Amino acid sequence: MLLGCIADDLTGATDLALMLTRAGMRTVQVMDVPGPGSALDGFDAVVVALKTRTSPVAEAVDLSLKSCDALLALGAKQIFFKYCSTFDSTDQGNIGPVADALMARLKTDFTIACPAFPANKRTIYLGHLFVGDMLLADSPMKDHPLTPMRDSNLVSVLQRQTKHKVGLVPFTTVTKGADTIAEAFHSARARGDRYVVVDALTDMNLYDIGTALADMKLITGGSGIALGLPSNFVRRGQMTATPAPTTMSAANGRAAIIAGSCSEATRGQVAAAIAADIPAFQIDPLALVSGGIDIDGLVAQILAAPSARPVLVYSSADPADVRAAQSELGRDRAGHFVEQALAAIAKRLVAAGFTRLIVAGGETSGAVVQGLGIASLEIGPEIDPGVPWTRAVGRDLVLALKSGNFGGRDFFLKAWNKLS
Ligand code: ADP
């Protein structure tokens, strides 16, 4: 095992595992801190999917350190802390505190922070994160239910989360290539920076940054930064690249889409699925809590829907409705109720013979995978940038775990075509 990865949410872990698989690494994703003697031989990369993006800081730090220790024990040569390409966090964390703790554990005093993912229109210029043609703070991320992002300057955002000094490697340096980037890392470190946010506008920039990271013990960033990491190991003769899969076989059975993301992309995908007459069942958090939604009754209705098409179960709502639910129930309680309801529904559908699931939303996917008791995922073909089909190892179940913001408008309609 060469690369040990710790992801702060499940869909982010899958996105990273896909990136590594596409770049030729044999990659497995595990849902928990791997215990001693875990059967993870034969993989170049192991991605531990935590659910720590919005958990209390101490818990996020503790689980990340345990994952780091386990990955080192499995032989990891480099540790990668993966977070969202929109740097989802609050002033309390968890990116800064987790990265601080990992640096201390790895006895290193320098790392980078680079969430850029140009294929998904996340770019960084002069430390400012853009989502498409908008600054982060103007993008729909300003209304995220759990981590509203209202400052686009990642140097400032990260600086509020760590007592260590945060600097910048600007685009003018990055564009000169890997050697210049590596020199910039040395000078920043000599200046006393412990973090540098690194600008990146293109995949070429990410490759070059990746090359410059060959000897860094700890890397932090989005999945994009993983683009350039596998070739470091190939160049050193530590692995040979393995071709990525193009289809995934799935057992016969019904299909469902479970959407708990309120992100703009997911709301568009829900609307497109409804417009295509996919049978749709809405979960309203207020109705859920007041007892207005009976899960048994809802599952019975879902099972009675025509079996030839997928069914859609969604709580996705626009920002005004999310705010209304949150002001009545509290942000975390509203999220928790919805996640638990969607997980319970997914569990019953799988028990009733569903074998193909799309789940939209990072937190939502975490709850569903936990509810289904899935321990590890094998990575299949890419559906849209950052989202692969996966197979629950040892089960007749394939899942596409989609980060809320990812995927084209027709994602819920076209994803099934990659299954055989
Ligand atoms: P994303 O990947 O878009 O961030 P997540 O699933 O990670 O999606 O986060 C969305 C959060 O919003 C979850 O905790 C979910 O339970 C919660 N949520 C979903 N629907 C609603 C709603 N209608 N009102 C309030 N919160 C909701």
Image: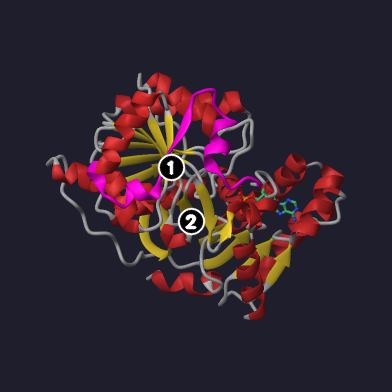
Q: Is residue 401 left or right of residue 24?
A: right
Where disc 2 sits, the SS reads strand
Left or right of 23: which side holds 144? right
Q: Is residue 398 left or right of residue 262?
A: left
Q: Which residues are magenta?
A: 150-179
Confirm whether residue 36 shows in the render: no
Residue 376: which disc? none
- Quarter where residue 92 is shown: top right
The x, y position of residue 6, in whole percent, is 43, 36
Question: Given the image, on which type of amino acid does mark 2 rest?
Answer: Arg
The image shows a total of numbered marks equal to 2
Taking the spot 49% from the left edge, 24% from the top edge, the residue there is 164
Query: Which corner quadrant holds the N terminus?
Result: top left
Residue drawn at x 58%, y 48% is: 152
Using residue 33 as the reference point, say whether residue 256 is left or right of it. right
- Against 255, is 63 above or below? above
Front residue of 320/249: it is 320
Q: Is residue 164 magenta?
A: yes
Residue sitting at 46 percent across and 60 percent down? 120
CA separation in Å, label 2 and label 1: 12 Å
Q: Quick one: which residue is furthest to the left in this view?
A: 237
**Which residue was labeled with disc 2?**
122
Whole-percent x, y for residue 357 in the image? 53, 61
**Kind of residue at disc 1:** Gly
Q: List x then y, in percent, for residue 303.
A: 66, 67
Q: Is mark 2 within 8 Å of ligand 1?
A: no
Rate crowding at label 1 as few (under 14), some (14 to 19) or many (20 or more) other CA atoms within 10 Å. Answer: many
Q: Residue at x 63, y 57 (%)?
A: 139
Label 2 neighbourhood size at 10 Å, few (<14), some (14-19), many (20+)?
A: many
x, y percent for residue 367: 60, 45
| Residue that numbered label 1 is attached to | 221
Q: Which residue is nearer to you in this view: 215 or 324?
A: 215
